[in-house]
Image (tube, rainbow, N blue to C red):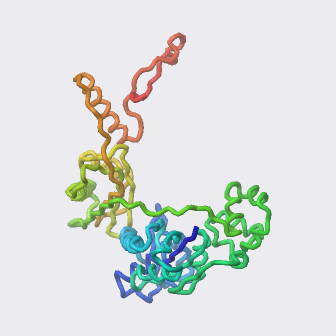
Amino acid sequence: MRVLCVLLPHFPFMCETRRNPAIKGRSAVITRTAGSQKLVFDYSPGLDGLHRDMPLQQALSRHANIELLQADIPYYWAVFNRVLDSMEQRSPLVEGSELGCIYIGADGLQLIYADDNALIAAMQEAVPEGFVYQMGVAANKFLAYLAARHSPRDGYKLLIGDVESFLRNLPCDVLPISIKSKDKLHDFGLHTLGQVSALPEGPLQAQFSPEGRKIWQLARGYDDTPLYPRFTEEVIEKSLYLASVTVSLEAILVAIESLLHQAFARNLKGKGICGLTLWTRSWSLEHWERNIKFKEPATDVKTIMSRIRRVMENYPQPGPVEQVGIKVTRLGYPRGRQKSLFSEVRVRDYLQEDIRQLELRQGNAQVFKVKEVEPWSRIPERRYTLAPSNQ
């Protein structure tokens, strides 16, 4: 397998400068909210000592005079998906599960591109103007990522030949493992991939459990992680700004219902909604997002709204809402079911369907039936039990 990795460093910040050129050249940090904590989501190039998901207080202790921007995650993904769409026109195997990091399958493209240089030139055309990129080609995803990280700005690196020499002096921090495992490697005095690869596999497995084998293999340049290309499926995105900032759940639900009606107004060809992403943006630019899935494709707005109401009641908004949006990520055909000829059976089926929808909204069993367990027991509580009605 040959993989091309395309890195777009500081992608969220580049999106912000594209939308607002005035911040270009400023020292700024993009933040996101995790519970009650503010974390670094991205930052302008040149700010040393920062990394993603660092607490904002630590970032301010290193750089006091920086401008703070609230992350606009839907906007970043909208720009990133357009980049992926452009690259899919040049190669069918494109993976983009993380903002600013793209993997492309380079095998089987010999009839289209004469060599790797021609493939890279085609992908360079897909990068939007104003974005910095780094590219690397290697035998697997991990090596391609390292090659891209060590390529020149707006350039590329082909990692072929002596891979061991390339990996020997690289720090262990480049490994895609947990922070805890990285700290543990440093505590053992293992600071480079060469030091890790020189060890037998057994001691690493003893100290790091299943992750130890992965660490040992990656340090030697072996990575069997497959490519996960994007599925070609219809995605429907709708959003709107509210007439006024509000904290009223009813007003927010009315706006969401309007968006759902717009989505169903499109020709879905008999399909229902299997999954959607619901998001809001507060007046203070706080981002709220939830993924909602349905066991059966929902074909009417009423069914979807009952589920959305339940979700929004359980997960309150971080502040007054200014913008709402939905993203339909999965569509599917409802399963056909022939109704019984007997009215009594049809009534029972309708009742079971109502019970199933109720339990889907509540998240657990709601209707039970009495079931005989130990009728011979002298203790009354042991003779019968309550079992969910669908069992």
Residue 369 location, x and y as percent? 40, 23
Residue at left offset 65%, top offset 63%: 180
Along the horizontal axis of the image, is 216 left or right of 261?
right
The quadrant in which residue 202 appears is: bottom right
Residue at left offset 52%, top offset 72%: 106
Residue 127 location, x and y as percent? 42, 80
Residue 372 location, x and y as percent? 47, 17
Q: Which quadrant holds the C terminus?
A: top left
Farthest front residue in view: 111
Along the horizontal axis of the image, is 34 left or right of 136?
left
Q: Nearer the viewer, residue 187 or 337?
A: 337
Q: Nearer the viewer, residue 375 or 378?
A: 375
Residue at left offset 29%, top offset 66%: 323
Q: How many marks?
A: 0
Report if residue 76 is visible in the image.
Answer: no
Residue at left offset 33%, top offset 49%: 332
Report if residue 238 is visible in the image.
Answer: yes
Vertical placement of 30 versus 47: above or below?
Answer: above
Vertical placement of 102 versus 280: above or below?
Answer: below
Residue 20 location, x and y as percent? 35, 83
Q: Nearer the viewer, residue 76 or 367?
A: 76
Q: Which quadrant holds the N terminus?
A: bottom right
Farthest bottom residue in view: 25
Q: Nearer the viewer, residue 353 or 65?
A: 353
